[in-house]
Image (tube, rainbow, N blue to C red):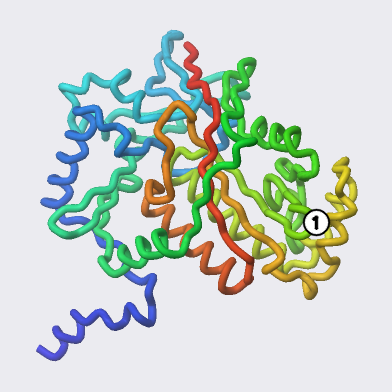
Amino acid sequence: FAFLEAYARKDYLDLFPNYKNFDEASELEAELLDQELLNIIKTGQLNKITLGIPEFLSDNNYGFSYSNHNRPNNNIYAYLDPSQLPENFKLEQLTIRKLRNANIFAYSFEDNRILGSQKWSVYDCISFEKQLNQNYFVLSDGRWLKVDNRFYENIIAFMNNTLREEPCEEIYKNIDISDHAAMQNREEIFNKSVISIRPSCILFDKAKLKIGLGRKDKEFCDILDMIDNKHIRIIHCKPYKDSSSTNYLFSQAKFYCDAFIHDQNFLTEIRNYISESTCPEKDSYLNYIKELTAEINGSDYTVCLWLLHNKNEIAPSKMDIPLMAQYELMLMHHLLRNTCKFRDIIIRFIPVQKTNYIMKK
């Protein structure tokens, strides 16, 4: 009995808080949750799920298709969206088996073809969260996971009480990011538009910088913005789509901002990039950003996370972010605020004009 009591104890979570945060749902729980998922889809409550492949792919390089026919009658979508499910499935006949057996294929804009070998089960691409019998579950990468209650409560408390969300600034609202020639929605169009609106910003999107002795393929951020020569915002942008892409933004921000504080080679690369830029305020940036990491104070900088959402849809808020991405955001926030001592981490949802291009291939 002593062994069983010790085995059931949870005090190890205080020492190792990230251990065993997720358990596999039981077979019965998974069946009940699958039925909830089917009901959500069949009744058109598609705003309660997200759809995205369970890994990160660049929007600039890939579109997606629900078929791979030899003849040219495949619909190629610029991006994935739950609203496409009624277009590709007979909802009244939909089953979990059909979702598992159906695939989403990557389409290469460069090769101008569907990549038959690069595919994912539709079921594996659905993210859905549901409370069942006082437990919280997430469907992620085709698996139903039960979230540890204490872990879940910690994330929700962080999102409610610690993370700052601010509204989008008026001057950046409703920028059209559609590229009609390429039939894509491009984040880089947004970033360049911000520079046009506010020329004192510096565009770091597509920069090729080196961290340590690594490859010269890092960006630092998307936009650097100095406010009245007194403060700098480090802005990271990403379309708001699904857990994988949102996770990528948070991981990228954590990695680059930590390197900015601690990696001398990276700091030198950043300063050299600013020096070579055409920004009329570059000297002010160079005077503000010290040459040595020992002189860089995180409290002089604010990290901004800008998530671009379709202006024609209901605006999301921080609590709408999938739980798995909320967890990554919490880890990022803890490192950048508590260790790197950045002044603040602020999230904004930016409404943009998007076009869900569909072409036949």
| Figure check: 342 above or below 214 | below
Q: Nearer the viewer, residue 39 or 215?
A: 39
Q: Position of residue 350 (x, y in %)?
A: 54, 39
Q: Position of residue 145 (x, y in %)?
A: 27, 55
For the N terminus, which image quadrant?
bottom left
| Figure check: 143 above or below 189 | below
Q: Please give left or right for residue 154 compared with residue 226 in the image.
A: left
Q: Residue furthest bottom?
A: 2
Q: Going 35% across and 61% down the picture, which residue do you hit?
A: 156
| Figure check: 326 above or below 306 | below
Q: Position of residue 171 (x, y in %)?
A: 64, 35
The quadrant in which residue 59 appears is: top right
Q: Please give left or right for residue 229 compared with residue 127 in the image.
A: right
The quadrant in which residue 51 appears is: top left
Q: Secondary structure at mark 1?
A: loop
Q: Residues within 10 Å of mark 1 (few under 14, many from 20)?
A: few
User: Could you tell me how many numbered marks the image carries?
Assistant: 1
Q: Going 46% across and 58% down the picture, which residue do you hit?
A: 328
Q: Please give left or right for residue 79 compared with residue 192 in the image.
A: left
Q: Going 28% across and 83% down the picture, which residue do you hit?
A: 11
Disc 1 residue type (three-letter):
Asn
Q: Nearer the viewer, residue 74 or 268?
A: 268
Q: Position of residue 257 (x, y in %)?
A: 66, 60
Q: Which residue is mark 1?
A: 229
Q: Going 50% across and 57% down the picture, which residue do you hit?
A: 164
